[in-house]
Amino acid sequence: MGTRETLFERADVRDEDVDDIVALAARLQDEARDAADEPTAEEVQAVARELDIAPEYVDQAIAKVAAQKEAEAASRAREAQEAGERRQLLLRGAGVTGALGALGLLGLLGLAVAADSRMDTARGVRDQAERSLVVVLDRQASLAPQLVGLAGGDGAELASLASDLRGAGDLDARMAASDALGAAMATSLGRLPPAADPATTQSRLELQYEVTGTANRITTERRRFEEADAAYAATRQGLGASIALGLGLHP
């Protein structure tokens, strides 16, 4: 049974976390092997097909994903608490103004609080979409050189581009590095000589499925992030949002 199937059967792992865990476990295993020695073709095949990842790396990945989820939940709770405290201070301040002024101020504060809530929700969706996109980009960086090497090409020439992708400072830089890595990978695969036997043909076909699947996943996650980013930007428009931003209710 493959790693993915095994994870789906584990009670301590949520189904929506399986892809993140598999990608992270594969990366941890890759890094450990890189530090010790170059992987064999059989080991690379196992990573490329997401089969038989060593249990210790799967456990590490599960622990890291769980820790990340807990940290994100704690961060959201702190942000919600701080926002609530700021709102309470503003509402108490409004209570000392004149009656008519207080009514007008409370109305504006109501708009600001509602806008802040919408922005918080949209930002959470945007941040989750960004994390999902980063996971698939990291997976591309881990697999691309190995897939080319397994197919008989020179995976070493892609290692530098994969390193650029991992080390990119922001999402725009990551996407640019991903596009460069994808183009170089296609070029490297295009240079391969014709397959000498049916086994090589089948192996290359399976690798092409992996390459196509990774590219499709990146396209999908990139589109989701762009939609979520645009939706978040839209919530930052309007009178209520302007007041919330001006008062510091929302960063």
Image (tube, helix red, strand yellow):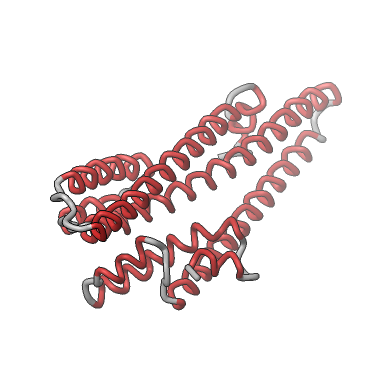
Q: Is residue 209 above or below residue 44?
A: above
Q: Quadrant of the C terminus?
A: top right
Image position of 233 with respect to 152: above or below: above
Direction from residue 197 to residue 14 in the image, left or right: right
Residue 66: which quarter of the image? bottom right
Rendering quarter of residue 143: bottom left
Name the residue: 53% across, 61% down. Answer: 68
In terms of depth relative to the viewer, which is nearer, 52 or 145? 52
Q: Nearer the viewer, residue 224 or 97?
A: 224
Looking at the picture, tell me which residue is in the foreground, 205 or 48: 205
Give the residue at x 73% y 31%.
109
Which residue is at 23% across, 43% downward? 186
Q: How many marks?
A: 0
Q: Residue 101 placed where, x, y %?
A: 79, 23
Q: Position of residue 100 (x, y in %)?
A: 84, 21
In the rendered image, the residue lying farthest to the right is: 99
Q: On the rendered structure, is 138 left or right of 242?
A: left
- Could you say where residue 41 lies in the image, as x and y percent from the top left? 25, 68
Q: Which residue is found at the position 26% from the left and 74% from the top?
A: 35
Residue 38 location (% of width, % of height) = 21, 72
Residue furthest toward the front?
Answer: 198
In the image, taking residue 243 as reference, residue 143 lies left or right, namely: left
